[in-house]
Amino acid sequence: MKPLRKLLDNLKPNFEKGGKLERLYPAFDAFETFLFVPNHTTKSKGTHVRDAIDLKRTMILVVLCLVPCLLFGMWNVGYQHYQALGISNNTMTDNFIFGLSKVLPLIIVSYGAGLTTEFIFAIIRKHTINEGFLVTGMLIPLTMPVDVPLWMLAVATIFAVIIGKEVFGGTGMNILNPALTARAFLFFAYPTKMSGNEVWINTETEKGQTLVDAYSGATALGEAAAGHANKIPDITESFIGIIPGSVGETSTLACLIGAAILLYTGIGSWRIMSSVFIGGFLMALIFNLFGLNTLMQITPLHHLTLGGFAFGAVFMATDPVSAAQTNTGKYIYGFLIGMLAILFRVFNPAYPEGMMLAILFMNVMAPLIDHYVVAANINRRLKRVKPIQNRNE
């Protein structure tokens, strides 16, 4: 790494103030701090919190936690593809290589479109590149159908960066989760590419033809919404993730592996994660008492393994910027996400997933939750002060 460090030191004067490439300093700084721990020091007086890990290292760790979902998603894309074509003698390597060929372009486009937009804004505003897109750039393709057109993915990513984040001031200021903003944009702008049976599985043959009616690629929740109880995968298949769905959302097991790392390192909020699962479990349990349709009859544990529930609880709801900030608020925030996700599934058959809308709605409500939690704490302390003041008088 020493030759690379020396090369950067030689190039740095060209990008610093007064250099020929001064305007491009944000891009150089982003590349330098991505490779090496920055040597920035605090300039103002006062108390500062110092830690051995900076924001870039934190974001990279979150990306590493997403790797189990990514790798399993690649394999599952290939597995579902060959199942659709009726090919059963394919190996695990065949599945993974095919999935890699389909998922890798999504990741490249996501990072390419998003980072280019971030660089442009950083240069215009003359500030350093925000680190938040390291995670967002991975989350966006993992929440998409495998067959989403690349140009749509690029448009959605640019929309998420500009409208979902930059207009609010950049990383740390956004009120909505940027990755879910991209998914919501595609869902409402191009619904045919985000819903229906054919979008979740690549059914293209070797000759470039597409199977239209030969195979149903409906998700488990789609089958449940249609009343096809016999076509819903069992809880074991749902937990492992061998089902149609978005690229990285199908495996609850892979999500829990990422959750374990996030909780062990202290990056993820256990309050939010646990309350999301508890809220979803209780809501599904209540619906089980009525059992008026197929979605109501699904057991609570089975509900938690279907769709993007686990992925949303672990990686989306815990976004430290758009989530509630107070400890009590995190419990309320997560609990309501879990309840609303199941509620949307049951009462909105046209959109049986529900997790995306639940999280986005609670993103908007998070500041209000924190406001009332803080106000309640202040009022409680004021009530303790009054008796003391009366005794002193």
Image: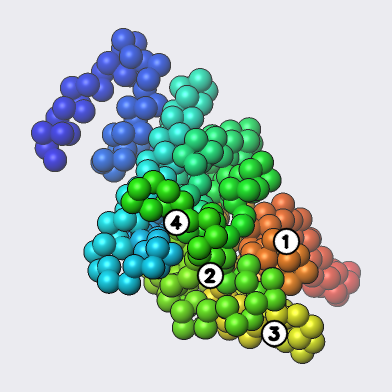
Q: Quarter of the image holding residue 25?
A: top left
Separation (CA) of disc 4 from disc 3: 31 Å
Task: Please tell me how many numbered marks the rendered image carries.
Answer: 4
Task: Say which mark, if any, is on residue 283.
Answer: none
Tag 1: amino acid: Ala
Q: Secondary structure at mark 4?
A: loop
- Taking the spot 53% from the left edge, 70% from the top edge, the residue there is 310
Of callouts 3 and 2, the N-terminal one? 3
Q: Pointer 3 and pointer 1: residues touching (CB < 8 Å)?
A: no
- Taking the spot 48% from the left edge, 70% from the top edge, the residue there is 243
Q: Secondary structure at mark 2?
A: helix
The answer to whether residue 92 is seen in the rendering is no
State the residue position of label 2: 310
Q: Residue 72 in the image: x percent, y percent?
A: 36, 65
Q: Is residue 98 left or right of residue 388?
A: left
- Which quadrant would the N terminus be assigned to in this image? top left
Separation (CA) of disc 3 from disc 2: 20 Å
Q: Secondary structure at mark 1?
A: loop
Separation (CA) of disc 3 from disc 1: 18 Å
State the residue position of label 1: 350
Q: Residue 164 in the image: x percent, y percent?
A: 61, 40
Foreground label between 3 and 2: 3
State the residue position of label 4: 203
Q: Is residue 142 left or right of residue 362?
A: left
